[in-house]
Image: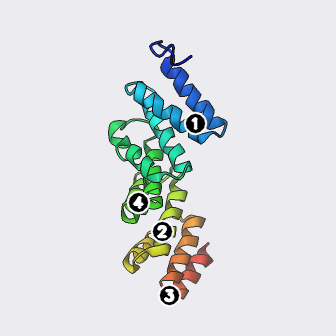
Amino acid sequence: LLAANAAAPVAPDAMYGRAWADLELKRPEAAAAAFRQFLAAWPDSPLTPSATFYLARTLVELKKPADAIALLAPFASRYPNHAFVPDARYLLGWSRLAAGKTSEGLQDLRDFVSAHPRHELTVAARRAIADALLKGGKKAELVQEYQSLIAQSPPTAEGLYDAGLIAQQLGRGKDAEAAWRRL
């Protein structure tokens, strides 16, 4: 039906709705294909930013972070006033970490936390930063993150817990205990 009526004024909405329905029905491969079709056919649609974000998020779910990066990297500059800009920034950092681009991913997540300290994904971003640093961070980076977590105002339970883990990794048992006592 869509192919036969691609020029219809409601065709972009129908294709977007189809992709969204596939997401809701837990068919990520079909959703990704439909979002790609939508973006190829209607790149100037008002729904393009949302379709781009949902395609990227679906690609991350499909364990294709490198493909998601290509969509997310220009998102904030292409759609600077879109409501999904913070979410796209977080997802870009997370995707880069998942793709093995640790330093870029860490920087993206730090930028996200800095720009959106009260966003609902900030806790997840801080957790991802701490996990990445604990897995392979350099001592200077660990110290910097520890200091950042301890200096949070107001302190968060997650931040104090992560600060304790990082202090422990650094061999600072007393600092770890102090962070966990504050927790």
164 is higher (above) or lower (below) than 54: below
Mark toward the start of the polypeptide (2 vs 3): 2
The answer for how far apart the CA atoms under marks 4 and 3 are is 26 Å
Kindly report which numbered mark, 3 or 1, lies closer to the viewer in this rendering.
1
In this view, the residue in front, 153 or 148, is 148
- Residue at x 51% of width, y 15% of height: 10
Mark toward the start of the polypeptide (4 vs 1): 1
The answer for how far apart the CA atoms under marks 3 and 1 are is 49 Å
The residue tagged with tag 3: helix, strand or loop? loop
The answer for how far apart the CA atoms under marks 2 and 4 are is 9 Å
In this view, the residue in front, 82 or 70, is 70
Please identify the quadrant where the N terminus is shown. top right
Mark toward the start of the polypeptide (2 vs 4): 4
Q: Which residue is mark 2?
A: 132
- Residue at x 48% of width, y 59% of height: 98
Please give the label number shown on residue 30. Answer: 1
Please give the label number shown on residue 49. Answer: none
Q: Which residue is mark 4?
A: 105
38 is higher (above) or lower (below) than 98: above
183 is higher (above) or lower (below) than 171: above
